[in-house]
Image (spheres, rainbow, N blue to C red):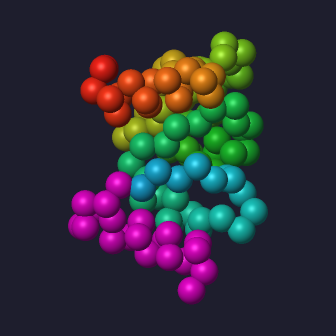
Amino acid sequence: MSVITALEEVLYSGRQARIHVLHNGRASGGGLTPSAREQFVTVILARVGTSTWQRLAPIAGPAPKYIAHPGRVHVVQDGTAHQTQALLLTDAEAANWLAATAAGEI
């Protein structure tokens, strides 16, 4: 069984098994089938072209204009796209935040 096949099986049974899947993968080239991509309730897209938008979020309408603001993403849920700001951290900031969280300081 390939990794993609196993991931697709998890996606198809995920809602019933209360499994949450985060997939940070390439949008094209040997990836998930269209029916498997439909299993994702929320899709977060950043810096994607028109063809990628139409493949991953076709129900949300045409691709929005490019946003040059760092960390700006589009969250697509229930057929609607919402622009939002993603958290931007350097590797050092992320490591410090994780250490503080693990120590109960946050």
Does 101 appear above or below 32? Answer: above
On the image, the x and y values in percent for residue 70 come to 66, 17
Say which of 87 and 12 sits in front. 87
Name above or below for residue 42 compared with residue 74: below
**Residue drawn at 71 percent across, 22 percent down:** 66
Looking at the image, residue 105 sits to the left or right of residue 75; the answer is left
Residue positioned most to the top:
69
Q: Magenta segment: does it hold 30?
A: no
- Is residue 9 visible in the rendered image? The answer is yes
Quadrant where the N terminus sits is: bottom right
Residue 42 placed where, x, y %?
42, 43
Which quadrant does the C terminus fall into?
A: top left
Rendered residue at 37%/40% (across/down): 78
Residue 16 percent across, percent down from the top left: 24, 67
Q: Is residue 32 left or right of residue 42?
A: right
Which range is magenta?
A: 1-20
Query: What residue sits 69% from the left and 45% below the top?
Result: 52
Q: Residue at x 59, y 36 (%)?
A: 45
Chief SS of the magenta region: helix
Task: Between residue 23 and residue 38, name the one nearer to us.
Answer: 23
Instruction: Farthest residue to the bottom: give it.
Output: 1
- Please tell me how many numbered marks the rendered image carries: 0
Q: Which residue lies furthest to the front in this view?
A: 103
